[in-house]
């Protein structure tokens, strides 16, 4: 049989989480070694003998045996929980104790516990996301660096600092402690949101990497939804926005592999199943008194995902949703999106006016789509030279070859129009 | 048709889970192709990298590994091929070659020569 897609990545998260619960967060590296070892064995055996019926169970059982070996080897050299230390001292109790720690019920919430552990309040958000990718999603340092368009050295440094903080917390997060749980939940939601955004809007050139990040964020959000106290209306809103955005992922790259603007995407390539899921989550999100940025962004994504075309989109509604979002979580990018929606609704001149009225728009100077929006509206009012100039600015700050290529194509399209206009005169 | 043993030497699984998965999928694809063309007599067995070496009249027992890590045999497969040349050609598709490993191709001696 074929292993399911990303089997090792996903199992890595579960296995490291379980082993870290057993060994303690200060022994995270030992947990990672045990998992690596189990993967090597799986690779050696499976490549010749084929993948077993239940690969997840096989891997977990191997990890358990390796854990027993590791505890036997390290019982004097390392510090473990007092209770565990007592049990592993004797051969009589070592194996049964580990057996019990691996029992199905005990393993159930490990991923969730680890997710909360990664969102330690002493860690900056980017470290929380890096940790999640590394520990829960099995991304190597190089793969995390690829996702964030950063260097191996920078991510390595960020990760080792973060792991020190994690190790300092000694125990894996206790998800049954109600007050701590609800106070850390927003940080977990935020980290998942940022992880998704990194995939959806991030600078990484490779579309495969970006789709992976989106899918990982969705997978971890689903883990939250499976846990009654984590499945709040806000978590549903977060799930809704991810699904509604992800539905449009297949349309973002056109048939020839080029980046495609939402205005000319082939909407038949959008994923209707994901739209349906998103809609269901959106309904479930509307049950409490909370109105978060996730609710509003999900509502915006829903308007886009269910519109037949750009022209038929309810831009008025989108404008008011962005205005609402500005009151909850204001940012220049939100202001820009609001201005773009106004331009769609009331014409290019109004769009430009609104962009120019953004108070802190100097903060958008490195954001290529700021210039692209200006260029697009200039183009629509037939100011081809200005449009040209703005797209050149966009090109200058483009973050990857795909964006560069997109702006270059826009520039040559405008060129053609410009020439036509001249010859008509 | 004659029989050949492929001995797989060295070669790393890869450090990241995704790399392990990719390597494994390559192995599976390679075996599938060999199997479809009727070259796989026995898919063989993986071997632990460590063991014991018993040697000489004194029957001295030492701990393995028995070679440099990069040369340790990690498994074998029994292959059917027309001749050594074809067996060598078949071994060139082995994914272990992409990770600095090697395939030793050894003809099985025939009973009736």
Image: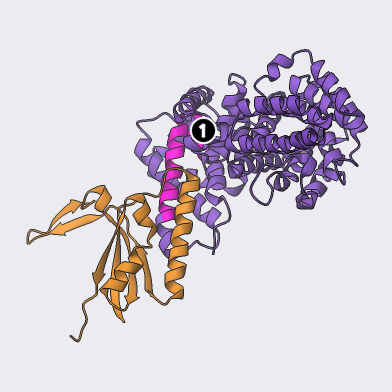
Q: Is residue A182 left or right of residue A165?
A: right
The structure residue drawn at horizontal position 51% and vertical position 50%, both measured from the top left corner, is A60
Which quarter of the image is occupied by the C terminus of chain A?
top right
Q: Position of residue A169 (x, y in %)?
A: 54, 23
B104 lies left or right of A197: left
Report if residue A306 is visible in the image: yes
- Residue A193 lies in quadrant: top right
A23 magenta-colored: yes
Visual colour scheme: by chain
In the displayed structure image, the side of residue A221 where residue B98 appears, left or right: left
Q: Quadrant of residue A171?
A: top right
Q: Chain B, which colour?
A: orange
- Magenta span main SS: helix
Nearest the eye: A271 or A32:
A271
Q: Which chain is purple?
A: A
Q: Residue at x 54, y 45 (%)?
A: A9
Judge by depth and name the residue closer to the eye, A105 or A344: A344
Count of residue discs:
1
Q: Which residues are magenta?
A: A19-43
């Amino acid at each position: 049989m074929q292993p399911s897609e990303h089997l090792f990545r996903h199992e890595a998260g579960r296995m490291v989480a379980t082993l870290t619960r057993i060994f303690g967060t200060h022994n995270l590296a030992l947990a990672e070694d045990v998992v690596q070892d189990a993967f090597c064995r799986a690779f050696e055996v499976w490549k010749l003998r084929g993948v077993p019926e239940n690969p997840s169970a096989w891997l977990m059982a191997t990890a358990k045996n390796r854990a027993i070996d590791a505890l036997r080897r390290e019982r004097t050299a390392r510090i473990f929980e007092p209770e565990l230390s007592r049990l592993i001292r004797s051969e009589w109790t070592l194996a049964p104790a580990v057996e019990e720690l691996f029992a199905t019920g005990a393993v159930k919430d490990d991923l969730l516990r680890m997710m909360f552990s990664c969102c330690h309040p002493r860690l900056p958000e980017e470290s929380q996301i890096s940790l999640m990718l590394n520990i829960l999603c099995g991304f190597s340092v190089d793969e995390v660096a690829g996702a964030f368009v950063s260097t191996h050295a920078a991510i390595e440094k960020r990760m080792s600092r973060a792991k020190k903080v994690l190790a300092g917390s000694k125990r894996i997060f206790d998800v049954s402690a109600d007050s701590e749980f609800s106070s850390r939940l927003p940080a977990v939601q935020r980290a998942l949101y940022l992880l998704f955004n990194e995939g959806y809007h991030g600078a990484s050139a490779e579309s495969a990497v970006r789709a992976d990040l989106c899918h990982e964020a969705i997978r971890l959000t689903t883990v939250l939804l499976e846990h009654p106290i984590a499945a709040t209306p806000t978590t549903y809103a977060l799930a809704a926005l991810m699904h509604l955005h992800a539905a449009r992922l297949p349309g973002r790259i056109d048939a020839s592999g080029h980046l495609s603007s939402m205005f000319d995407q082939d909407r038949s390539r959008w994923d209707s199943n994901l739209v349906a899921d998103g809609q269901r989550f959106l309904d479930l999100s509307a049950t409490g008194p909370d109105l978060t940025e996730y609710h509003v962004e999900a509502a915006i994504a829903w308007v886009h995902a269910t519109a037949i075309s750009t022209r038929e989109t309810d831009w008025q509604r989108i404008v008011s949703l962005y205005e609402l979002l500005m009151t909850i979580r204001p940012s220049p990018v939100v202001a820009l999106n609001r201005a773009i929606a106004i331009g769609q609704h009331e014409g290019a001149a109004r769009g430009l006016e609104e962009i120019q009225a953004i108070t802190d728009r100097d903060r958008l100077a490195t954001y290529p789509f700021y210039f692209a929006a200006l260029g697009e509206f200039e183009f629509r009012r037939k100011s081809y030279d200005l449009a040209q100039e703005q797209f050149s600015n966009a090109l200058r700050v483009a973050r990857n070859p795909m964006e560069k290529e997109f702006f270059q194509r826009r520039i040559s399209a405008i060129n053609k129009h410009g020439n036509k206009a001249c010859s008509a005169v | 048709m004659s029989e050949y043993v492929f001995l797989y030497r060295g070669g790393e699984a890869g450090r990241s889970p995704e790399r392990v998965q990719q390597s494994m999928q390559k192995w599976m694809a390679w075996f599938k192709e060999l199997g479809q063309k009727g070259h796989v007599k026995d898919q063989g067995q993986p071997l632990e990298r460590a063991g014991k070496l018993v040697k000489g009249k004194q029957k001295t027992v030492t701990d393995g590994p028995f070679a440099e890590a990069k040369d340790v045999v990690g498994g074998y497969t029994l292959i059917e091929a027309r001749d050594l040349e074809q067996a060598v050609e078949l071994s060139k598709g082995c994914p272990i070659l992409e990770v600095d490993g090697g395939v030793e191709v050894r003809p099985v001696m025939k009973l009736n020569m």
